[in-house]
Structure formats: structure tokens, C-alpha cells
Amino acid sequence: MTANPLNLQDVFEYVETHIETFHNKKLQKLEQLTLNKLLVRKNPYLFKAKNIFTAEGLVRSILDAFLSSQEETLFGDFPEGVAVFVCGKVYGGVKPASDLEGIDLIFTNDDTVFMVEIKSGPNWGNSSQIKKMLLNFEHAKRILSSAYPGFNVFAVNGCSYGTEPNPYQRDGAYLKLCGQDFWRFISDHDDLYTEIIEPLGYQAKQRNEQFQEEYGKIINKFTLQFGSEYCLPDGTIDWAKLVRKISQRRKNTPYPLEREP
């Protein structure tokens, strides 16, 4: 298939429209949070080791750590959506049916069907996760070889940012393309990786101000609650009580090795 010219205005409009979803989900996660939900997700020993003395300092540290991990997760689907949209415009690429597990994008170029698993950055997986991706590629290749007779089927791991100096992985079993190379691959546009950064800031100032207002409310509310529930009368954090809240086994539940299997 011959590449269709990419209209950058289409891409900008897509990004500006869909970045709203990220901001909405981020705010929604914050609004749905409770102090106890937040506390049980984090390691109390780490925060004690950081020598935190105030309820506000502890709440802020735990909340910031939670939000940082949530942001990466919430934003993760966004580059995939942009890539599928762009490739759809240029090569007629589509997100495949669910029977192609792990495959986020398929498209044809000349006599090759490309099956693409999209990740955020280059350092995304451990050995077992890489193995799972390879199994996904093998499974998808069998299906696509039948669906596209006469075409070569080739696997690609695309990463939305970063670089990969050795793109041919596992003796050429798949191609790993990152950053500029990945965006060029799905768009036939060598500068797309820099072009898409500007529309990401659409209404960012307004949305960030809205988020910071809610963030401030949560800090104040959780600090009051934490002080009431996990601080001693003299204001000291009751670390033992906090650890029990997070790690103590349920009441009337014996130690596992002292009960019948």
C-alpha cells in the first residue's frame, strides 16, 4: 500500500480532543481516593526510613508517589491511540480484534503485514514479559498468515519515546523501534515525534490549576484525618499503629503455618 500524506492538522485535532480523557481520568482518580486506600498501597518502612516527622509531610509523600505511578498508567494508552489514528490515516492501520492478544496495531505496506505491540518507553519489560510478547507474536502470525496469503508477516515492538541502537531483536525475530524511528515507521513522517508534543499542552494550564486545587483539598483533608487516626497526643506519628493498619493479619486468623492447608 502506498503511504497517504499525513495531514498534521488532523493529528493535532485528535491529540487536543483525546488529551482531555487523560486529564479527566487523572482528576477522577484523585477525587475517588480515600486515605485508607492510599495508605495500604505504600510501604510504611520506606517512609519511616525517609525520616518524615509530620502528618502533612507523610501524606504528601505518599500521595505524590501514588500519583506519579498513576500518571504513567493513565497516560500509557494515549500514545497507542495516537499511533493507531496516525497509521490509520497513512497506511489504513487498525487496532485488531481481541483474538490477536497483545497486538495493538496491524497494517500493510507493500507485501508485508506488520503486527505491532506498542509500549510507552524502551525499558518496559522483564524477561517473562518479553517472552509473553514473543508468544503473542507467534500466535498472531499464524492467524495473519492465513488472513493475508502471499504477504510476509513481521513483528514490531514500538515504543513511543526513547531510542534503540539495536533494533533487530532476538536474531531478527522482531523489530524494536523507539521514539523518532517508531513514529516515522507508522507515519512516513520523520519529524512527527516532535510535531505531536505541542498539542499535548492544549489547555494544560487550566487543567493543571483545576487539578492543583483538588490536590490541595485532598492534602488538607487527609492530613487532618491522618493526624486524628495515626498521631499520638503529643503530635508524634504512631508508626506502630500505621504498620499494623497496613500489615496486620485479620482478626481471628491464625498464622498460616499453624493451620491446616
Image (cartoon, rainbow, N blue to C red):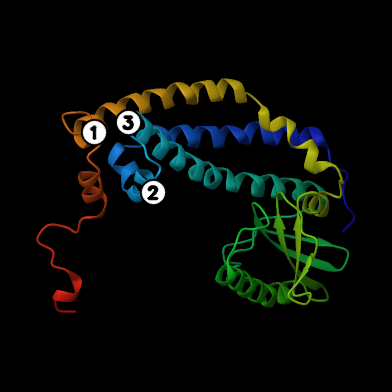
Give me the residue at 71% from left, 31% from top: 199
- Give me the disc on residue 54: 3
Q: CB under 8 Å between callouts 1 and 3? A: no
Q: Residue furthest left?
A: 252
Crowding at dot 3, Cα within 10 Å, few <14 / some 14-19 / many 20+, comes out as some
Q: Quadrant of residue 239?
A: top left
Q: CB under 8 Å between callouts 3 and 2? A: no
**Amino acid type indicated by mark 3:** Thr
Q: Earlier in the sequence, mark 3 or mark 2?
A: 2
Q: Secondary structure at mark 2?
A: helix
In this view, 36 is above or below 127: above
Give me the residue at 64% from left, 73% from top: 134
Crowding at dot 1, Cα within 10 Å, few <14 / some 14-19 / many 20+, comes out as few
Q: Secondary structure at mark 3?
A: loop
**Amino acid type indicated by mark 1:** Thr
* Residue 78 at x, y percent in the picture: 62, 44
Give me the residue at 43% from left, 27% from top: 215
* Residue 89 at x, y percent in the picture: 78, 46
Distance (Cα) linking label 3 and label 2: 15 Å
Q: Which residue is mark 1?
A: 236
In this view, 130 is above or below 65: below
Q: Quadrant of residue 1?
A: bottom right
- Give me the disc on residue 46: 2
Distance (Cα) linking label 1 and label 3: 8 Å
Crowding at dot 2, Cα within 10 Å, few <14 / some 14-19 / many 20+, comes out as few
In this view, 137 is above or below 60: below
- Residue 47 is at least partly visible in this image: yes
Please state if 202 lies on the left or on the right of 187 as rendered: left
Q: Please name whichever residue, 223 or 3, is drawn nearer the observer in this view of the structure.
A: 223
**Amino acid type indicated by mark 2:** Leu
In this view, 235 is above or below 258: above
* Residue 257 at x, y percent in the picture: 19, 75
